[in-house]
Amino acid sequence: MLQQLKKNKTEVYALGRHISLSADKARRVIDQIRGRSYEETLMILELMPYRACYPIFKLVCSAAANASYNLGSDKANLVISKAEVNEGTTAKKLKPRARGRSYVIKRNTCHITIVVKDVSLDEYEYEDLYSFENPRSKKTTRVYDDVYSSGVVWDKK
């Protein structure tokens, strides 16, 4: 029997866009949690004194919730496999200055991506190429409720 190597889905991600934070300040925190386990990451983020920790904390919790819902994995088996910060749009405001001039105030945003991997799941598994069961040949029978005898308006005479 022929078998094919099939790649299973073991990674899920959470994406935070337009977070009102400088990308450099967020990278300072992201570099500390990359490659660590989920529980260790939560402890690190709670104890670090930076303002960037709270949105990253929420994204890590969201990625763990995605992993438990989509993959059915336990949170103890999760590892932060990839974490990256990209620069977002910059909001510009004008502040009036003396003698009719203006000064630009720039408000930076960033996009944060957290990828979580379940280490307990196998990444690859063997799948049969030829099997005797053809899923297209399965016949399904549908049961339709009789609308006229369901006890609604049409039964009353």
Image (tube, rainbow, N blue to C red):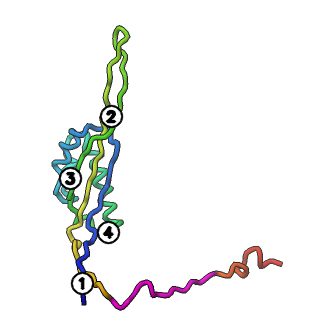
Point 26% across, 44% down: residue: 86
Instruction: Decide which of 123, 34 is in the foreground and name it.
Output: 123
Which residue is denoted by mark 4 in the rendering?
71
Against 56, residue 102 (above or below) is: above
Where does the image place residue 142, in percent across and percent down from the top left?
57, 83
Marks 1 and 4 sit apart, C-alpha to C-alpha, by 24 Å
Against 94, residue 112 (above or below) is: below
The residue under label 3 is which amino acid type?
A: Met
The magenta segment is 131-144
Front of the two marks 2 and 3: 2
Mark 2, other Cα within 10 Å: few <14 / some 14–19 / many ≥20 = some
Which residue is denoted by mark 3 in the rendering?
43
Against 138, residue 111 (above or below) is: above
Where does the image place residue 96, in percent across and percent down from the top left?
37, 16
Front of the two marks 1 and 4: 1
Q: Quadrant of residue 135?
A: bottom left
Point 23% across, 66% down: residue: 118
The residue under label 1 is which amino acid type?
A: Gln
Can residue 50 be seen by looking at this rendering? yes
Mark 4, other Cα within 10 Å: few <14 / some 14–19 / many ≥20 = some
Residues tagged 1 and 2 counted as in contact (Cβ below 8 A): no
SS majority, magenta:
loop
